[in-house]
Amino acid sequence: MRLTAALLSVASAFFLASTSEAAASVGGYLLLNPTNGPAKLAALAQNAANIPVNRIYLSFARPGMVYVPGSNTLEHVGLNYANGGDYGFADLKARVAQLRAGGVEVYLSVGGWNYGCWPYVYTQYSVGGY
């Protein structure tokens, strides 16, 4: 059974590789923090068309994050991008727009070393009812 599954996986990979002309993805993650995270993101965004990556993962959002639609604040998201006002929402939104305009895909990475994970709690209270 395992051998069959492995062979099917390998065959699928060869088939997909030979039939698709997808561009290579090169990515990296950017650890955001209030000290130098905004400056690093600004530098990447300003040079988006020239950087050697086409995917950036912004890290790390808290698994139990809360965003209130329309609030335009990152206060309870856990990115630690900024420590006041809108907690970096407007700046982060502008930088992501710059990156995307330069051909860079931007993802939000959830979790990370400092966030413990109790799957029952997250599924029960955050996504359990969906």
Image (spheres, grey):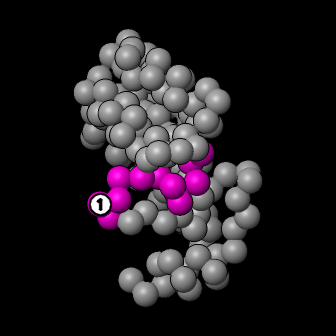
Residue drawn at 47 percent across, 45 percent down: 85
Where does residue 33 sit, x and y in percent of width and height? 62, 37
Residue drawn at 69 percent across, 74 percent down: 118
Residue drawn at 54 percent across, 83 percent down: 125
Res 35 → quadrant: top right
User: In which quadrant is the N terminus drawn?
Assistant: bottom right
Where does residue 24 sit, x and y in percent of width and height? 39, 29
Extreme front residue here?
85
Whether residue 64 appears in magenta in the rendering, the answer is no
User: Which element is circle 1 on?
Assistant: loop
- 14 lies above or below 97: below
Secondary structure mostly taken by the magenta-highlighted segment of the chain: loop
Res 124 → quadrant: bottom right
Along the line of sight, the residue nearer the viewer: 85 or 41: 85
Residue drawn at 53 percent across, 45 percent down: 84
Along the line of sight, the residue nearer the viewer: 103 or 30: 30
Let me know if residue 17 appears in the view.
no
Residue type (three-letter) at the residue carrying disc 1:
Gly
Residue under label 1, please give it. Answer: 70
Q: Which residues are magenta?
A: 69-81
Where does residue 86 sit, x and y in percent of width and height? 44, 47
Left or right: residue 111 versus residue 70 is right
